[in-house]
Amino acid sequence: QLKEQSMEYVYMIAAFNAFFFALLLFQKKGKARHDKILIFWLIYLGLYTGIYGFYSHNLFENFPLLSGSFISLFMLHGPFLYLYISALVLKRSVPLSRNLIHFVPFFLFNLYLLSAIFSSEISRGISLDHASPNFAPPFLFIIFLCLTVLSGPTYFLLSIQLFRKLDTNISNNFSYSENIDLDWLRKLVLIFGIIWSVLMIIASIYHV
């Protein structure tokens, strides 16, 4: 009980920090495109960590469909990171339609979970409570879980390609005006890739 309360405080502090930095960025004048992306990313992280901290102990046991939707939020980490990096690295503006395509798997996953409400045969097999599996999970649910696991490494590789494109532009064009020091961001992407891979391996072994 004490350990759970301590973790709730940690998540609450993390959520508060995310909202606080989002508020600071929101007050910034002349916000660039990467600032706006970071604001949405921070708000999302604040909501995610806050909800997880307060409701995770009941979510996975009592609300299987809702817990599946919550897991689908992991699909948003990679796209937000990738779009933030692309806004910093690429000189040209990417059309909104091309940006939204990164969120299609997330919306399809939740559309599938929403449709499961109207089918008892599908909904009874959707569960993340590995301790007492009563029914075999639906094939599509397994596919979406696999896509969630692969989302992080995929966007990690895409982000590395963006940095390589930046290095190529700088080496081939001496008049290239991109002088932003992005070493800190490279390290962030590397840490993201390592942590995500380790967490997904542990989670897969734990549940499967």
Image (spheres, rainbow, N blue to C red):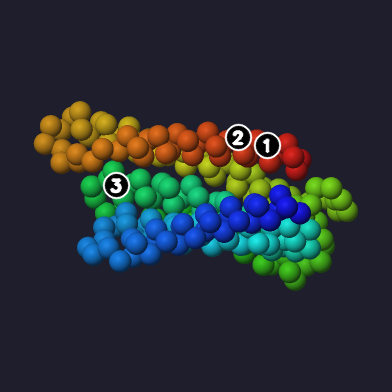
The amino acid type of the residue labelled 1 equals Ile
Image quadrant containing the C terminus? top right
On the image, the x and y values in percent for residue 84 come to: 37, 50
Residue in the image at 15% along x and 41% along y: 177
The Cα atoms of the two marked residues, 1 and 3, are separated by: 32 Å
Which numbered tag is attached to residue 88?
3
Looking at marks 3 and 2 on the same chain, the residue that comes earlier in the sequence is marked by 3
The Cα atoms of the two marked residues, 1 and 2, are separated by: 6 Å
Residue in the image at 35% along x and 37% along y: 184
Disc 3 secondary structure class: helix
Disc 1 secondary structure class: helix
Residue in the image at 58% along x and 52% along y: 10
The amino acid type of the residue labelled 2 equals Val
Which numbered tag is attached to residue 198?
2
Q: Is residue 131 above or below residue 51?
A: above
On the image, the x and y values in percent for residue 89 come to: 29, 43
Do we see residue 1 in this rendering? yes
Marks 3 and 1: in contact by CB < 8 Å?
A: no
**Between 11 and 56, which is closer to the camera in this rendering?**
11
> Dot 2, how many residues are within 10 Å of its Cα: few (below 14), some (14-19), or many (20+)?
few
Marks 2 and 1: in contact by CB < 8 Å?
A: yes
Looking at marks 1 and 3 on the same chain, the residue that comes earlier in the sequence is marked by 3
Which numbered tag is attached to residue 202?
1
Do we see residue 106 in this rendering? no
**Between 207 and 135, which is closer to the camera in this rendering?**
207
The amino acid type of the residue labelled 3 equals Leu
Image quadrant containing the N terminus? bottom right
